[in-house]
Amino acid sequence: MIRTEGLTKRFGRLVAVDGFDLDVREGDLFGFLGPNGSGKTTTVRMLLGLVFATSGRIEVLGRPMPRAAREVLPQVGSLVEGPGFYPHLSGRANLSLFDAAGPSGPGGTGSRDRRRRVDDALARVGLDGVGRRPVRAFSTGMRQRLGLAAALLRAPRLLVLDEPTNGLDPHGMREIRDLLVELVRGGTTVFLSSHLLAEVELVCTRAAILDRGRLVAQDRVAALLGPTGRVLITTPDVGAAADLAAALPGVRLGERRLDRLAVHLDGTPPEALNRRLVDGGVRVRELVVERPTLEDVFLQLTGRNPHVPG
Amino acid sequence: MFLVELRKLVRRPRTWVTIALLAGLPTLVAVLLRVTGVGPRPGQGPAFLSQVLNNGALFPAAALALVLPVFLPVAVAVLAGDTVAGEAGAGTLRYLLVRPVGRTRLLVAKLAVTVVFVFLAVLVVAAVAFAVGAWLFGVKPLPSVSGQTIAAQDATWRTAVTVGYVAWSMLGVAAVALFASTVTDSPLAAALGALAALVTSQVLDLLDAAAAIKPYLPTHYWLAFVDLFRTPVLWRDVNRGFAVQAVYIAVFLGFAWANFATKDIKS
């Protein structure tokens, strides 16, 4: 759905995006992660033809961007750096203005069923029934929802969302997450740019991590979060557990606290360790194969050399 | 796209407040003239105003002469300066462009709506002024600036050409403001930029040392429409005014297009 090759953008001497190859496949819920200023928004803007790349190629829905913008963009819904509306108009009037602005989308989405489409989009984000209140009087969360509604207006094949849950309360975040999962199930591909790692970890199937304009990782989320090779054991018999574990080949003991013990397995299957402990009379309360959180992976990939600008 | 922009224009309260204020100034002047009966002496004060006391038919032209030097250009600069920069500032520009609305199309639609506003404003001022003038001063056959009488029909087309001329002059302002609007994301900066250009032009127009460039200044021929009320009509300056504005309009619209079509939208 989205492919880039050697995508690069310079602003004067600053290299905002440094030659990367992105690959978002159909049906992905793709997390696009990076610290502030790592080039996420610039990339999103290039994908949408708002900012022109210095070099490299972009393909969206199999067509070159920005050259094929007229064919591509009607099938793409987007939310870029917060929603933008005419504050003196109601949410409904805003949506219908935006809907009227572009060419009619695929499937004959002309002006005739505009009212229905606007109603549908508002209902999807839980904004039905806000009535004629001008957007000026909306809360941040409501604006965010309205922005999402605008992105959903044309039943897009691809959604490009930049921080869609900004300003939402936990309930709102949950609703939006559920909505995204539902959309993906219905065949939409979602490109989700975010720095909320927990959010991405919860919903995304694939992810890319960006650091100072370079792509440092791109893989399935499950693969990024592969086991660390450590096992965490909770037991009242910590001393005995440590002795038994240490006797296994290749196993090193990690830190030990009260009733908890960390063990580096180095190839020994965790179930073998468990059998050994149980056979040795250790009362195992809990034995967990440790997996990193996305935050761990993210900090490891992006935090090694703290970046000092200038 | 034009219809969308038109809807934005008419649904915006500011549009109507501006036009009401524009029509309000000449109305206020007319009421004051009527109540006090004190007009400027012939040859002094704003154009035509001295004759208006005797004949309301001249008031549309007088009203345009009143709003032309400052009020009208300010209104046009604010509106045209807001076109692109206002969308950028509100964060709506990016959503229009990814709808997608082609950049050239957006610019053309913005320009067309500005033209509509300019004509609407000038027409409303002229119409209100005619009504007010006829009501307060009565309508008689016009004495021309040159002394002879102008027939009512004649006066109508002269006023019509005046409306067209003033609108064309304002389009020059709009072109400069539209260009400024594509350069900045702040509507205020765009409007002020265009106004700065006009003030510069008006200052230079008063300066003898600038005599060589005066005929090329955008504001130089603004008031040339007075010549339309001479008998026979003195076309020279009016024609030059049209031509000079045409060049400014073409050049600044060209700049605006070239800049906007290749610009990184970071707003």
Image: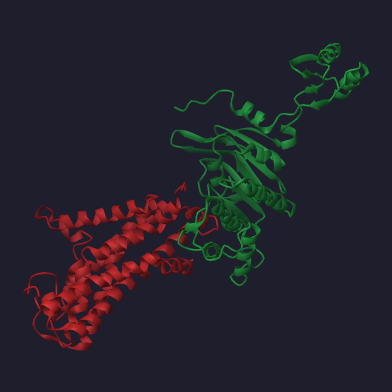
Chain colours: A green, B red
Q: Is B180 on the left-hand or right-hand side of B196?
A: right
Q: Looking at the image, which is closer to me, B9 or B218?
A: B9
Image coordinates of residue B20 in percent, x first then y, are 31, 71
Q: Is B17 on the left-hand or right-hand side of B64?
A: right
Image coordinates of residue B91 in percent, x first then y, are 47, 52
Image coordinates of residue B137 in percent, x first then y, are 16, 84
Tell me if I can see residue B2 in this picture. Answer: yes
Which residue: 78% across, 13% down? Answer: A252
Which residue: 53% across, 36% down? Answer: A36
Residue farthest to the right, as pictured: A279
| Residue B181 drawn above or below residue B41 | above
| Residue A179 drawn above or below residue B159 | above
Q: Is B163 on the left-hand or right-hand side of B146?
A: right
Q: Looking at the image, which is closer to me, B163 or B16?
A: B16
Q: Looking at the image, which is closer to me, B47 or A295?
A: A295
Tell me if I can see residue B251 in this picture. Answer: no
| Residue A113 drawn above or below residue B85 | below
Which residue: 60% across, 41% down? Answer: A194
Image coordinates of residue A23 in percent, x first then y, are 67, 41
